[in-house]
Image (spheres, rainbow, N blue to C red):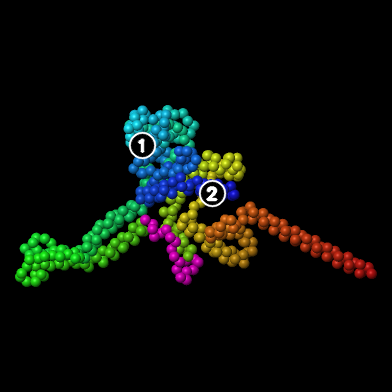
């Protein structure tokens, strides 16, 4: 556990270091994941190989295919770096025309493709790695780099996929898109209606006002030539029915709530407690909350959080950031590391354990009253540790399982020793009493 906590600290610092651009890249893929149901993130080491680097790519520039196991194993990405960057990245294989262009305009764009595919699909390169990475100058049809790589190099989280397609959609956007378009139309109509209510349309006598509309804005002065009748006889405000504005505002409010529901904005926070709510009712509300947010957080943890953490851990481990592989505890070698994430869903699931523990304790008390041996069914140490973790008790406050077991064994040993000494003392007292009785009888 100590080794895992140590490596977790190193991994956290490496991922969140300002040069890794992790915050920027993940914010961009969050937007794509919510809006389009998919995103493209490329984790790698930086050019100097002294830190992690995260880059997101626009969906229009990336295409991918998946294999028979529904796993993405081929990625095509179009790219337009400058000639200056191409020469730095591929100094020995860049085309001469690119060098010529760079001498005239170092920032002219060169159309490049990056392709990652299974190594058996590119027999021109002999490699033992599972994938091949190709950088291709499209204009000159020249492969500037072809190397074997251990991983695909792209993380492509997908929210909701359709059978027979490798591309995904966003359920939130699919539901909210029509409402959003209607909301925009209604907003435009209400803005126009409000403007008419404040600055209504007018009708005026063309001969009196000289063919120009009266200046009805604040501070405006209109000179009119009229001699017969009052001003109202030559000018009037066209009456408008304003009764529809409140109804339109109510409809817009309803649409906003529907869009919020579609985008899960109303389901992220835990439902507030109600006065005089029983523990059973609170537990049921928590379970209902879990069911509501499951379509949002469960795919995100599986498709985004877990792959990013797994990729960073593997890269840092191979790069020696955690020291020599021989320093890894023997029980962790070859074991798959599973990451646990903090999220409203995870917190709700953990909080539910507290209520389950309270219900179990009450039921166990009734069962023990009938059969005392039923208390041995539940491992209270494990159950209570889960409850403490669910309540957010800091890990430093708790002993490890090994330390707690050692302390329990020590206490059991002391109790057994005390019982044995007491038993021996009791035997000695009995022997002394018998001896005293025999002496008295002999006398």
Residue 167 placement (x, y as % from top left) = 37, 44
Q: Is residue 304 visible?
A: no
Q: Label 1 crowding class (10 Å Cα cut-off): few <14, some 14-19, many 20+? A: some
* Residues drawn in magenta: 263-281
- Which quarter of the rendered picture does the C terminus lie within? bottom right
> What residue is drawn where x is 42% and y is 42%?
42
Disc ID at residue 205: none
Residue 377: quadrant of the picture: bottom right
> What residue is drawn where x is 30% and y is 56%?
180
Residue 71: quadrant of the picture: top left
Q: Is residue 48 above or below residue 13?
A: above
Q: Residue furthest left?
A: 228
Q: Main secondary structure of the magenta part?
A: loop
- Asked if residue 41 lies left or right of residue 429, the reply is left
- Asked if residue 254 lies left or right of residue 192, the reply is right
Q: Nearer the viewer, residue 84 or 81?
A: 84
Residue that numbered label 1 is attached to? 82
Q: Is residue 389 visible?
A: yes
Alpha carbons under labels 1 and 2: distance apart: 37 Å
Q: Mark 1: which secondary structure?
A: loop
> What residue is drawn where x is 41% and y is 36%?
116
Residue that numbered label 2 is attached to? 9
Residue 16 placement (x, y as % from top left) = 48, 48
> What residue is drawn where x is 17% and y is 64%?
220
- Asked if residue 280 lies left or right of residue 382, the reply is left
Which of the two discs, 1 and 2, labels the residue nearer the N terminus? 2
Q: Is residue 279 in the magenta section?
A: yes
Q: Label 2 crowding class (10 Å Cα cut-off): few <14, some 14-19, many 20+? A: few
Q: Nearer the viewer, residue 104 or 369?
A: 104
Q: Mark 2: which secondary structure?
A: helix
């Amino acid at each position: 556990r100590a080794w895992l906590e140590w490596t977790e600290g190193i991994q956290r610092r490496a991922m969140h270091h300002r040069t890794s651009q992790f915050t920027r890249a993940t914010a961009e893929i969050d937007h794509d994941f919510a809006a389009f149901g998919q995103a493209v993130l490329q984790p790698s080491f930086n050019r100097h190989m002294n830190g992690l680097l995260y880059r997101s790519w626009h969906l229009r520039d990336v295409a991918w295919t998946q294999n028979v196991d529904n796993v993405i194993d081929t990625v095509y990405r179009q790219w337009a770096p400058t000639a200056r960057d191409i020469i730095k990245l591929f100094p020995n294989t860049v085309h001469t025309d690119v060098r010529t262009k760079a001498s005239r305009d170092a920032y002219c764009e060169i159309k490049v493709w990056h392709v990652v595919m299974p190594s058996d699909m590119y027999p021109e390169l002999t490699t033992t790695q599972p994938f091949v990475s190709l950088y291709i100058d499209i204009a000159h049809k020249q492969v500037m780099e072809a190397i074997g790589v251990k991983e695909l190099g792209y993380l492509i989280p997908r929210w909701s996929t359709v059978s027979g397609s490798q591309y995904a959609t966003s359920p939130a956007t699919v539901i909210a898109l029509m409402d959003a378009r209607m909301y925009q139309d209604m907003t435009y109509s209400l803005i126009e209606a409000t403007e008419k209510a404040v600055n209504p349309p007018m009708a005026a006598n063309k001969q009196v006002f000289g063919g120009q509309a009266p200046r009805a804005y604040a501070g405006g002065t209109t000179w009119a030539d009229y001699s017969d009748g009052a001003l109202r006889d030559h000018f009037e405000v066209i009456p408008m029915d304003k009764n529809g504005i409140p109804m339109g505002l109510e409809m817009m409010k309803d649409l906003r709530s529907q869009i919020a529901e579609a985008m899960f904005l109303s389901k992220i926070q835990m439902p507030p407690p109600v006065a005089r709510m029983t523990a059973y009712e609170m537990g049921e509300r928590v379970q209902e909350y879990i069911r509501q947010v499951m379509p949002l957080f469960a795919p995100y943890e599986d498709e985004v959080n877990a792959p990013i953490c797994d990729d960073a851990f593997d890269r840092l481990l191979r790069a020696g950031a955690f020291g020599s592989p021989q320093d890894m505890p023997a029980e962790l070698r070859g074991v798959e590391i599973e990451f646990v994430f903090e999220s409203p869903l995870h917190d709700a699931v953990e909080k539910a354990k507290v209520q389950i523990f309270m219900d179990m304790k009450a039921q166990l008390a009734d069962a023990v009253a009938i059969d005392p041996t039923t208390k041995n069914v539940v491992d209270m140490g494990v159950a209570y540790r889960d409850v403490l973790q669910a309540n957010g008790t800091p890990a430093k406050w708790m002993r490890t399982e090994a330390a707690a077991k050692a302390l329990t064994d020590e206490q059991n040993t002391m109790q057994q020793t005390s019982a044995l000494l007491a038993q021996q003392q009791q035997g000695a007292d009995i022997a002394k009493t018998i001896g005293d009785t025999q002496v008295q009888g002999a006398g």
